[in-house]
Image: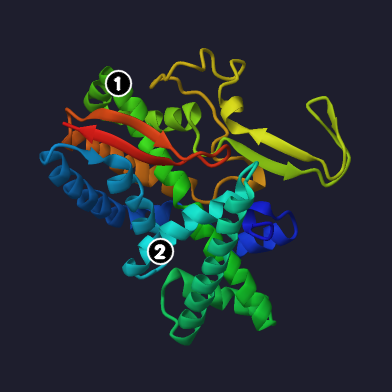
Amino acid sequence: MTKTLSRLNAPEHTCQRRSLGNLFDRATIERMTPHVDREVTRLLDTLAEQLRSGGADFAQTVSEQLPIGTIGSWLSLPSEDHPHLLEITHNQVYAQELLPTRSQLAVSAGATKQLRTYFTELIRQRRAAPGDDVLSGWIRTWDELEPDRYAADEALYRLTMFITIASLETTATLLSSAVWHLLDEPSRWTWLRENPEHVEAAIDEALRYDPPIHINTRVAAADTVLAGVPVAKDSMVHVMYGAANHDPRRNPDPHIFDLLRAGSHLSFGGGAHYCLGASLARLETRSMLTQLLSRFPTLRVVSPPVFASRMVFRRVTSLGVAI
């Protein structure tokens, strides 16, 4: 992952980011909204069927499926490949953990090879039969930027792979986390259903209170001083988003989940590395919450969320709900 967009600095980062344009600008989000709304409706129809039978796993039925359905459609990835992409994404992320075990690194290495195989073949196929899709556009852009075909394809591989896997677990965790914290106190669910204009505020509070990524790691490029602390060149610095979001100097009473807080958070990062998919994650969560609140006024949690055993990337593996 060291050569993917999130780990690069200028000038490489600048070149790759500019090649993508304004990835999820307002016009793009508006074009994607009808598809996301339809995908949410389809998934909630499945959820309704399961709830009529007694109960359902919200994380597996909705949260896991909406991000891959969204990004898969946007990149024109075959729907039959979605389960495979989810599996290898879950396996690859161990390499980005703070203290992975030897066996976890082995699993991640295998998943990385599968990602390489999948996206290399995807780019080859799209080159052979280009169209009006997003990836074909990137291919044309990089062929103009980089005369070396191998170098262009390497950049395309890293961009396409990174944007795909970065769109999955983080958004899925946000979806489950938002539902869990709203249902944890039933009055919140009722209030938000009566005041749907505050859905965006609920999304921001879910991001602040329980961010999908708790820790990010950087390496100092030069000797520097950070908040009065000397940091030597090549030292690792762990940015703790979860702790920052709960800093009482920024968010009073940070342990309280407050739908009207209007506070601040670092869950999408900041600066040049601000999350590329922030607008897309908000769109998916907004559509999901809006429809969920309308269709399931009596939704309740019957088994609390189960989290994967990780320190960096949170992942809700199950969340039992009923009506």
Q: Residues within 10 Å of mark 1 (few under 14, many from 20)?
A: some
Position in image of residue 298 (x %, y %): 17, 27
Q: Kindly give the residue lying farthest to the left in the view shown.
A: 52
- Circle 1 or circle 2, nearest the eye: 2
According to the picture, the residue beneath numbered tag 1 turns out to be 188
Position of residue 200 relative to residue 131, above or below, is above
Locate residue 127 relative to residue 14 in the image: left or right.
left
**Point 31% across, 46% down: residue:** 60
- The image quadrant of residue 285 is top left
* 268 to 83, vertically: above or below: above
Discs 1, 2 touching: Cβ within 8 Å: no
What element does badge 2 sit on? helix
**Amino acid found under the numbered disc labelled 1:** Arg
Task: Name the spot of residue 92 as percent of width and height, x first.
Answer: 54, 56
The tag on residue 84 is 2
* 103 and 256: which is toward the camera: 103
Q: Amino acid at mark 2?
A: His
Q: Residue furthest bottom?
A: 128
Q: Position of residue 146 (x, y in %)?
A: 68, 77
Q: Is residue 273 left or right of residue 193?
A: right
Picture quadrant where residue 173 is located: top left
